[in-house]
Image: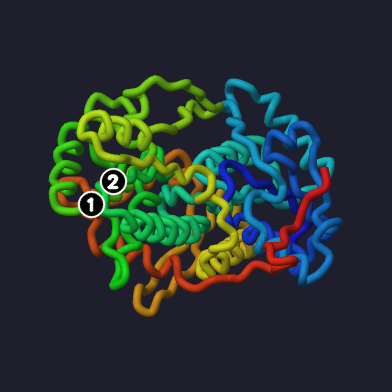
Amino acid sequence: MIGNVMVGQSGGPTSVINSSLAGVFKTAKDRGANKVYGMLNGIKGLLDRQYIDMSDYIKSTLDIELLKRTPSSFLGSCRYKLPEIADNREVYEQIFAILEELEIDAFFYIGGNDSMDTIKKLSDFAILTSSPIKFMGVPKTIDNDLNLTDHTPGYGSAAKYIASSTKEIIRDGLVYDTPCVTIIEIMGRNAGWLTAASALAKGDDCEGVDLIYLPEIAFDVDKFMDKIRELLSKKRSVVVAVSEGIKVADGRYVFELADHIEFVDAFGHKQLQGAAKFLANKISATIGCKTRAIEFSTMQRCSGHLTSRTDITEAYQVGGAAVKAASEGETGMVIVLERISDDPYICITGCKDVHKIANIEKKVPLDWIINDGTYVSQDFINYATPLIQAELTPIMVNGLPKHIKLDR
């Protein structure tokens, strides 16, 4: 049995984050929760006493299925960094006063690295004050950079979108007989998991991208230009995938080599945008051929029309596993996915200490980056391929996907 529950979503959205929310809601109700509250816009919304009773929106099995198939964060999100406990104890006292007023037994936060930092701090304060409230992290991030988990829910669907869209871009480039270089910019600040997924486009019906550049390896502009010249001497259409976070040897992001407007969020993260445009402009000016810069931008996050069934199923499972763990007394933990086998693909849930996950980035192994830092190995292909398998068709109305909507 479990008492009242509070659940929230934080950070960037994904196409399956609501499947985890559905997993938390359904499992909590099955385990006897009276109320499942959803905080609006994460921990920041909770501080403003903004929350709903999830039962006002989820009233049937159909509603749960619709929620699972609705991309982006149903409850809204935030990028709010909790202060250190020693620096501002009052913030924590305010949060815990709200949770105690609502008789919350367990608190679940669905998110990535920054969200796990929130769980770490809240669980530490609970221990410090002997609060009985359980705090559990539910993994979510298309970046796939959480430590100690084989992969994160959200990544598989984003990888599927990236590989599918890349395949279509490659076909588009083959139409004309004039030389053209297309640079695809894919999300990834410090970890190149998403950009690496462009390699999945290669198959019997597609030659794949020509070059892949990840932020794990320093980017050399001169070597890049030499590679482009070499490729253009052999083929008319060149397609390159780059992470938005690629940096040159002195630590500057490639997009910073051009004029740009800088925005920094609450966690000190610069908004990354413009690497593809800079490189395309440089090729056009130096080599003189036609270029295109394509930014997948936010489209890769919430492509609910191309969701991986594996991904959406695992997202639901980690939500349910978090509730189960909390009801059995766990706190200060994060649910992780543990791969048992590649063929057949088998993955189970586990539970790890949030202190070993929060603020630790998992990057693409360097031995998976090959060809002088311009491609990824078969080991990556073997790792990622099971995560994009099968589809879960949206519920269609008038030819378009139907989404569940929060009235605000």
User: What residue is rendered at 83% in x and 47% in y?
Assistant: 407
The mark nearer the N terminus, 2 or 1, is 2
Q: Position of residue 359 (x, y in %)?
A: 45, 38
User: What residue is rendered at 78% in x and 35% in y?
Assistant: 97
Label of residue 180 in the image: 2
| Quadrant where the image shows the C terminus | top right
Residue 327 visible? The answer is no
Cβ–Cβ below 8 Å for labels 2 and 1?
yes
- The residue at which mark 1 appears reads as 236
Pointer 1: residues within 10 angstroms few (<14), some, or many (20+)?
Answer: some
Q: Quadrant of residue 47?
A: top right
Q: Is residue 208 above or below residue 119?
A: below
Is 44 positioned to the left or the right of 186 in the image? right
Is 136 positioned to the left or the right of 260 in the image? right
Q: CA distance from mark 2 to mark 1?
A: 6 Å
Pointer 2: residues within 10 angstroms few (<14), some, or many (20+)?
Answer: many
Q: Amino acid at mark 2?
A: Cys
Q: Position of residue 182 (x, y in %)?
A: 33, 45
User: What residue is rendered at 64% in x and 37% in y?
Assistant: 78
Is 162 positioned to the left or the right of 175 in the image? right
The one of 204 and 147 positioned closer to us in this rendering: 204
Residue 386 visible? The answer is yes
Q: Amino acid at mark 1?
A: Arg
Assign a secondary structure to mark 2: strand
Q: Position of residue 391 (x, y in %)?
A: 54, 71
